[in-house]
Image (tube, rainbow, N blue to C red):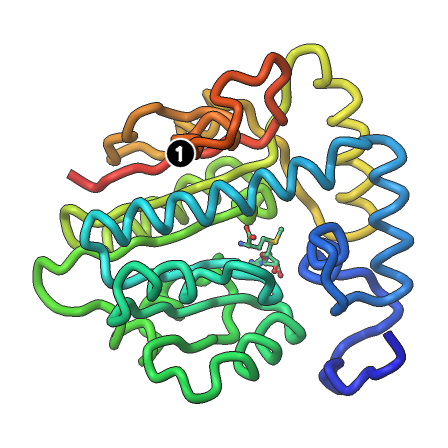
Amino acid sequence: MTDQTWIPVDVDTGRPSIARIYDFHLGGSHNLPVDRAAAREVVAMMPELPAILRANRAFLIRCVEYLAGRGVRSFLDLGSGIPTEGNVHEIAQAVNPQAQVVYVDNDPVAVEHSRRILLGNDLAVAVDGDLRDAVSILTDPEVDRLMLGPGEPVAVLMSAVLHFVPDDAEAADLVAAYRDAIPSGSYLTVSHASLHEESAARIGRAAEKYSRQVAPMKVRSREQVADLLKGFEILAPGVVYCEQWRPGPDDDPAPVYPLPQACAVARKP
Ligand SMILES: C[S@@+](CC[C@H](N)C(=O)[O-])C[C@H]1O[C@@H](n2cnc3c(N)ncnc32)[C@H](O)[C@@H]1O
């Protein structure tokens, strides 16, 4: 794209970004040559990556529909990304026009573009924040407004972002901090870079490359993802690969080789 007015002035255009690389994989136009080059290098090692990311996004849409259908009105989307087709507020508000969403991301393009598309929507807002700083996120006035009051459940979404917290103890503490802050009956949804036994070595090498070139990340098995969800009840069908989580009528419910992106929806008892 030649129009570059979407690039905030503080963006280092010489460094690839997680959010812009993901945008490229999803077919978006908010990415730069440096992002496309990094994306292509990883895809050369892991050709299934774009399909994994599409399956991730499809899971996010299905789980937001599911939770909005169960009466959840408030969504805190951590690591929300650059807006794309089927944004969380569009999905949730299609089920309940009063649904509220706070998007949080630490990427300036993601925050700026989210703010642009949310102009005029009083029920959705984008916050510039680092999800690892749970105290700041949870005391942000917009997030505070989202917590609707005693007993009203919220959904915290951590979609394709926890693998960017490579330290296991930090990731577990982080999940626990959000869990402790939300009312009983609230939900946490997670999707996470994962692996199969046969692909473990290859995916491990691709993740190392991504960690060196873009941002540190950690691939976790479904068991390790389940370990991060202590204190929650994991809803059926459990920690599965994205395609296997409540597939739609047109989806294959039991692919022979499911794409290695783990996911779960969990409820705080
Ligand atoms: C792979 S994208 C996923 C976007 C969206 N959640 C989805 O699943 O479609 C990961 C997003 O997390 C953001 N991110 C990574 N680390 C973060 C952090 N520590 N705090 C806030 N956002 C973060 C990135 O900027 C990027 O937009």
What residue sits right under mark 1 in the picture? 264
The location of residue 156, given as percent across then percent down, is 35, 53
**Left or right: 50 with respect to 143?**
right
At 54% across and 37% down in the image, what residue appears? 192
User: In this rendering, is residue 139 above or below 187?
Assistant: below
Quadrant for the C terminus, please.
Answer: top left
Q: Is residue 253 left or right of residue 135?
A: right
User: Residue at left 46%, top 59%?
Assistant: 78
Q: Nearer the viewer, residue 197 or 208?
A: 197
Q: Quadrant of residue 3?
A: bottom right
Which residue is located at x 43 percent, y 34 percent?
248
Circle 1 crowding by C-alpha within 10 Å: few under 14, some 14–19, many from 20: many
- Provide the secondary structure element on which disc 1 rests: strand
Q: Which quarter of the rendered image does ligand 1 occupy?
A: bottom right
Q: What residue is rendered at 47% in x and 47% in y? A: 60
Q: Amino acid at mark 1?
A: Ala
Q: Is residue 1 left or right of residue 141?
A: right
